[in-house]
Image: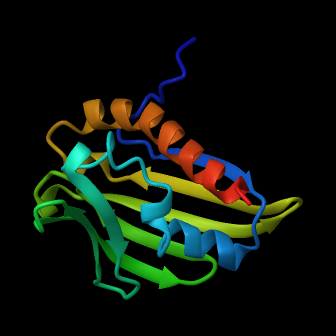
């Protein structure tokens, strides 16, 4: 039996528990993104990327900064509700009109905070089915980095 949903536009949902309070988990995921995001492999500039910043306002940008001073907008904030929820139109390396959608929630749980990421709106991209297939293991890797940083003293 296949693990793939019948609908290629079905949201990807990833969840994990990190040993932080919700406000700490939210802050690390957003303001602290440069401390855990794998810029060398999961960015537009790759080895030349050195930071990613989230503007914590609705309409604000998620911006990658590259060594030569250039920047690349990855997304736009559509909801900013610390410490419980952030949502983004997400389009790293693609035109904004092809934005998928991310929603990340932070809920108290035994041992810390349950972080749930839902990635949807695959039909906005001409390669939506392929993108969904590639993001599935990609989010596992990226969120593993987040979890590792969250667990670091």
Drawn side of residue 58 relative to residue 81, left or right: left
**Residue 74 visible, this angle:** no
Drawn side of residue 6 relative to residue 85, left or right: left
Camera-side residue of 77 and 30? 30
Q: In which quarter of the image is the C terminus?
A: bottom right
User: With respect to residue 136, does 104 lie above or below?
Assistant: below
Residue 127 at x, y = what percent?
A: 18, 36
Q: In which quarter of the image is the N terminus?
A: top right
Residue 52 at x, y = what percent?
A: 33, 65
At 48% across and 30% down in the image, what residue appears? 5
Camera-side residue of 6 and 115? 115
**Residue 36 visible, this angle:** yes
Drawn side of residue 69 relative to residue 30, left or right: left
Q: How is the image coloured?
A: rainbow
Camera-side residue of 85 and 153? 153
Going by the picture, which residue comes out furthest to the right? 110
At 42% across and 63% down in the image, what residue appears? 34
Q: In which quarter of the image is residue 47?
A: top left
Drawn side of residue 83 relative to residue 153, left or right: left
Residue 51 at x, y = what percent?
A: 32, 64
Residue 26 at x, y = what percent?
A: 59, 73
Q: How many labels does the image show?
A: 0
Going by the picture, which residue comes out furthest to the bottom? 57
At 53% across and 38% down in the image, what residue appears? 140
User: With respect to residue 60, does 20 lie above or below?
Assistant: above
At 35% across and 86% down in the image, what residue appears? 58
């Amino acid at each position: 039996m296949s693990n793939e949903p019948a609908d290629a536009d079905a949201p990807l949902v990833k969840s994990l528990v990190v040993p932080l309070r919700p406000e700490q988990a939210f802050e690390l995921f957003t303001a602290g993104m440069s401390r855990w995001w794998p810029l060398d492999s999961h960015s537009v500039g790759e080895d030349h990327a050195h930071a990613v910043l989230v503007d914590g306002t609705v309409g604000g940008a998620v911006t990658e900064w590259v060594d030569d001073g250039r920047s690349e907008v990855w997304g736009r904030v559509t909801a900013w509700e610390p410490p419980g929820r952030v949502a983004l139109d997400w389009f790293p390396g693609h035109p904004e009109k092809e934005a998928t959608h991310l929603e990340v929630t932070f809920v108290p749980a035994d041992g810390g905070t349950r972080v749930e990421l839902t990635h949807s709106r695959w039909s906005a991209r001409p390669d939506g089915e392929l993108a969904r297939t590639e993001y599935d293991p990609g989010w596992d890797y990226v969120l593993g980095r987040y979890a590792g940083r969250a667990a670091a003293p």
